[in-house]
Amino acid sequence: MSNLRFDVSLHPLPGAAISGPPLVDPRGTWPTIVPPADAAGMTMASDFDAALERLAALERAFVEPDGSFVWVGPGGEERWQIDGNAYERHGRVLVVETKGSCPEDIFDRFLAVWGWPGQDLAVQLVRAGVFVDEPTFRRHAAAQTG
């Protein structure tokens, strides 16, 4: 199982995104997406407080009521960490800004907190300033080095 390294924002993807120009970086060429114009300000289906409760229930997760969080691995050979902030609008999750490094199965559990796989996500690569779909994000995050 591959480790993912990331600095991203998770946004709801309420409809079909169109293809954007490819991202070319030292790790390869990646297809991007352009979320629908009406997606700005849309929230995820998940209730904000319920999502934070799900996150807080994970082992070694620390969550503040304002949406800041950190979730850490057990240490030793299994050292990993995910941290960030979740933001809400009208009681629903609006966006999740997160960075870290973790095994892919751990990231699956993290995404499930926010309603994935039922919730389609647009993943913004913060440093590149582009959106990708979730499968492209995983390939890009697995290709990170250093």
Image (spheres, rainbow, N blue to C red):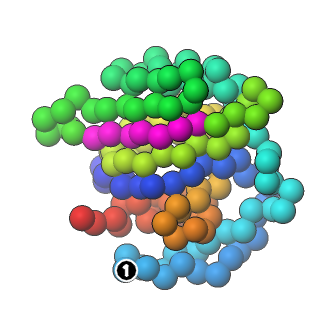
Residue farthest left in this picture: 76
Q: Where is residue 110 in the image (x, y as percent from the top left)?
A: 48, 36
At a point 58% along the width and 74% down the height, the residue shown is 31
At a point 31% along the width and 53% down the height, the residue shown is 2
User: Eyeballing the image, is 128 above or below 10?
Assistant: below
Q: Where is residue 76 in the image (x, y as percent from the top left)?
A: 13, 35
User: Eyeballing the image, is 40 above or below 66?
Assistant: below
Q: Is residue 108 visible?
A: no
Q: Quadrant of the C terminus?
A: bottom left
Q: What stretch is highlighted in magenta?
A: 80-86
Magenta-span inclusion, residue 26: no
Q: Name the residue under label 1.
A: 26
Closer to the camera in the image, 34 or 15: 34
Q: Where is residue 11 in the image (x, y as percent from the top left)?
A: 66, 49
Residue farthest right in this picture: 38
The residue type indicated by label 1 comes to Pro
* Left or right side of 25 for 128: right
At a point 46% along the width and 17% down the height, the residue shown is 57
Neighbour class for label 1 at 10 Å: few (<14), some, many (≥20)? few
Q: Is residue 22 visible?
A: yes
Q: Position of residue 59 (x, y in %)?
A: 36, 21
Q: How many marks?
A: 1
- Under tag 1, what secondary structure? loop
